[in-house]
Image: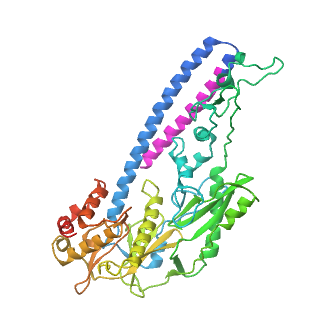
């Protein structure tokens, strides 16, 4: 995948070079027009058209390479999903696990490398926050990334990417010409030619200047135009802000000591971004990675709107947590992968209190096209929905014994799954594929989850545990899908499993052939 990214970088650089050449040609055209050299203008137009074609071909190639990269990432994610946890990974102490976790250096935000705002550690999220309340409609910032010109945070601070959005709302008497990000048009072409505009002879206007918004007004009506300014330090502003919020979160929530702390709620933080007299608030949710969200409307600094925005920030005090002792020696951990930096580790024997713990590092899902952000957001949504289902089910809808209480906890660049340690062995493929009490317990658990708008998809023998008696336990809830509405029957579960797989993943119905029949047998 690194080779593909290298090719993308090369093509992107070529596109920028062509853009610079096009800009120069535009300047040359304007100069030739000023000299009334029509022959040179015609020649330059031919050169311009050829450059545009080359640029379009490179954009097509860039898009193909990006698609190839996404396909490779999807394949890596599929391998990752099916690879861990395995039952035969080497065992380590907790301290040894931490020694193998990938090391990250976060340098000063004034430097251009190793910043905290990089996909491995953090992301600007233009989506609805998971814990925080936002005063923004969810469509406001999401609409930016629907633009063809915006694909990364830095693009949000380039004026050329917003010419079209700037003219979405104009007065009714104003006419708008659609403008591409790299288009150029001088005032003479937009408002002239100069000969048809009644400018007094003693006034000289800069007809070669280039308006940013291509707007004209119907005769007799007020003019309407605009000016956008790029914020060259926009990316740096977010990076610096996030760095300082990170310092504050460590200071208030993670004291030094022989333990790693994991809270029952995500750690959060707030920050002010201003450019420079007008600003807005951002919030941070620490869910594996640092997720940065805009959460307020813009305001003038020192205004009543500024005060109201700050006053509305909730004070979410965190206290309830689990602390894992780095010096413990009586608990062994298995790790994935077996060599190299650890992505996921889990206990192989019960901890004090009879608990099972699985530690997922912030780098665990970096092969996902979203850089892992959507995976951590999905984990939060899944365990939140599961926790609600366990707490709120009715007395007539008993939770099956095969389902266990499980919680997702939140630490520094990692999350922790905590649940009871049960079972003495994994189920065998033969046991799971036999119509009997084991599969019946699994079916009842899957139907109950479906009634509570959860779809269990990762059914395989290693996720069904047996104890010394007749106990059967369905475990590993990470990949459960949160549905928009409950499933009323086993047949509905079958349909939804097929719909979810769609050739992307191994479907539980194919891995366990008797499952479909048993799900459909009873309502």
Would you say residue 438 sits in the magenta stretch?
Answer: no
Q: Main secondary structure of the magenta part?
A: helix
Q: Position of residue 441 (x, y in %)?
A: 24, 76
Q: Position of residue 218 (x, y in %)?
A: 65, 27
**Left or right side of 159 for 430:** left
Q: Which coloring applies here?
A: rainbow
Question: Can see residue 108?
Answer: no
Q: Residue at x 47, y 56 (%)?
A: 371
The span picked out in magenta is: 1-29
- Find residue 105 and report its image quarter: bottom right
Q: Position of residue 37 (x, y in %)?
A: 66, 12
Q: Quadrant of the C terminus?
A: bottom left
**Left or right side of 128 for 492:** left
Q: Position of residue 457 (x, y in %)?
A: 30, 65
**Left or right side of 64 for 29:** right
- Find residue 374 and report its image quarter: bottom left
Numbered circles on residues, count: 0
User: Residue 499, relative to residue 433: is it above or below?
Assistant: above
- Find residue 39 and report its image quarter: top right
Q: Residue at x 35, y 74 (%)?
A: 90
Question: Can see residue 424?
Answer: yes
User: Residue 227, relative to residue 439: is it above or below?
Assistant: above
Q: Residue at x 77, y 20 (%)?
A: 199
177 vs 66, nearest the viewer: 177
């Amino acid at each position: 995948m690194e080779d593909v990214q290298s090719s993308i970088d090369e093509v992107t650089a070529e596109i920028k070079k062509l853009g610079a050449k096009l800009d120069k040609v535009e300047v040359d055209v304007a100069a030739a027009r000023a000299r009334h050299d029509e022959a040179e203008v015609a020649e330059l137009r031919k050169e311009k058209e050829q450059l545009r074609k080359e640029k379009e071909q490179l954009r097509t190639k860039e898009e193909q390479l990006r698609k190839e990269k996404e396909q490779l990432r999807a394949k890596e994610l599929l391998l990752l999903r099916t690879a861990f946890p395995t039952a035969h990974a080497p065992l380590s102490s907790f301290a040894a696990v931490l020694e193998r976790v990938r090391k990250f250096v976060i340098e000063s935000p004034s430097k251009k490398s190793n910043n905290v705002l990089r996909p491995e550690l953090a992301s600007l999220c233009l989506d609805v926050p998971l814990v925080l309340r936002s005063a923004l409609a969810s469509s406001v910032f999401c609409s930016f990334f629907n633009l063809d010109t915006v694909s990364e945070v830095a693009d949000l601070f380039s004026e050329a990417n917003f010419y079209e959005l700037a003219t979405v709302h104009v007065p009714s008497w104003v006419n708008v010409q659609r403008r591409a990000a790299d288009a150029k048009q001088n005032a003479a072409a937009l408002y002239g030619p100069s000969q048809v505009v009644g400018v007094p002879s003693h006034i000289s206007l800069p007809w070669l200047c280039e308006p940013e918004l291509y707007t004209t007004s119907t005769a007799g009506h007020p003019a309407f135009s605009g000016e956008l300014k790029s914020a060259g330090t926009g990316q740096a502003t977010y990076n610096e802000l996030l760095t300082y919020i990170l310092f504050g979160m460590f200071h208030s929530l993670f004291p030094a000591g022989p333990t790693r702390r994991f809270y029952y709620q995500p750690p959060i933080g707030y920050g002010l971004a201003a450019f420079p007299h007008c600003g807005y608030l951002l919030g941070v949710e620490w869910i594996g990675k640092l997720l940065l969200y805009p959460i307020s409307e813009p305001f003038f600094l020192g205004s009543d709107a500024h005060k109201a925005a700050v006053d509305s920030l909730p004070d979410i005090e965190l206290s309830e947590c689990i602390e894992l002792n780095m010096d413990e020696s009586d608990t062994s951990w298995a790790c994935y992968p077996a060599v190299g930096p650890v992505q996921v580790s889990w206990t192989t024997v019960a901890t004090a209190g009879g608990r099972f713990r699985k530690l997922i590092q912030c780098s665990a899902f970096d092969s996902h096209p979203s850089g892992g952000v959507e995976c951590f957001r999905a984990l939060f949504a899944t365990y939140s929905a599961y926790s609600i289902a366990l707490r709120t089910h009715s007395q007539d809808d008993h939770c099956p014994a095969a389902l266990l209480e499980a919680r997702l906890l939140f630490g520094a660049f990692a999350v922790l799954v905590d649940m009871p340690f049960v079972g003495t062995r994994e189920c065998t493929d033969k046991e799971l594929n036999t119509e009997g009490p084991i599969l019946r317990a699994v079916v009842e658990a899957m139907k109950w989850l479906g009634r509570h708008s959860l779809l269990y998809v990762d059914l395989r023998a290693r996720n069904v545990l047996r104890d010394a008696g007749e106990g059967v336990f369905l475990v590993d809830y990470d990949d459960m899908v949160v549905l928009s509405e409950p499933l009323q029957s086993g047949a509905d579960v079958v349909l939804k499993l097929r719909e979810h797989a769609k050739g992307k993943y191994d479907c539980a119905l194919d891995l366990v052939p008797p499952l479909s029949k048993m799900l459909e047998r009873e309502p």
